[in-house]
Amino acid sequence: MLDKIALVLVIIGALNWGAIGIFQFDVVAWLFGGTGAMLSRIVYTLVALAGIWAVSLLFRDTDSVHVRD
């Protein structure tokens, strides 16, 4: 579950960076009151933590079979 939450946050961050790069428009800042707003900073921090978590996905054993009940 944590992997999926991290993935969603990384996607949000990637889309936001795409909007900044292409349109010079920060969607997170626009939604939450500017880049210095507390809520924006929380979102930026969560996206950064999700990115760090996503690094662990590179080093996991994906060959093992997971059996669900």
Image: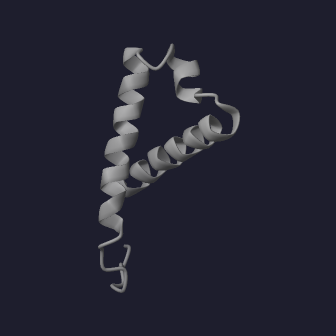
Residue 48 horizontal/vertical position (percent): 36, 42
Above or below 26: residue 19: below
Q: Quadrant of the C terminus?
A: bottom left
Q: How many marks?
A: 0
Residue 28: percent from left, percent from top: 53, 27
In-image side of 61 versus 17 (left or right): left
Q: Nearer the viewer, residue 6 or 16?
A: 16
Q: Vertically, is 37 above or below 66?
A: above
Residue at the right extreme, as displayed: 23
Q: Is residue 24 above or below residue 65?
A: above
Q: Which residue is rendered at x = 45% and y = 53% of the image?
A: 7
| Residue 3: percent from left, percent from top | 37, 57
Residue at image point 30% right, 80% down: 61
Instruction: Where is residue 2? Give x, y as percent.
Output: 34, 52
Colouring chosen for the image of the structure: one colour
Q: Quadrant of the N terminus?
A: bottom left
Q: Quadrant of residue 45?
A: top left
State the residue at coordinates (60%, 35%). 20
Taking the spot 46% from the left edge, 48% from the top edge, the residue there is 10
Give the answer, above or below, for where 34 lies relative to 18.
Answer: above
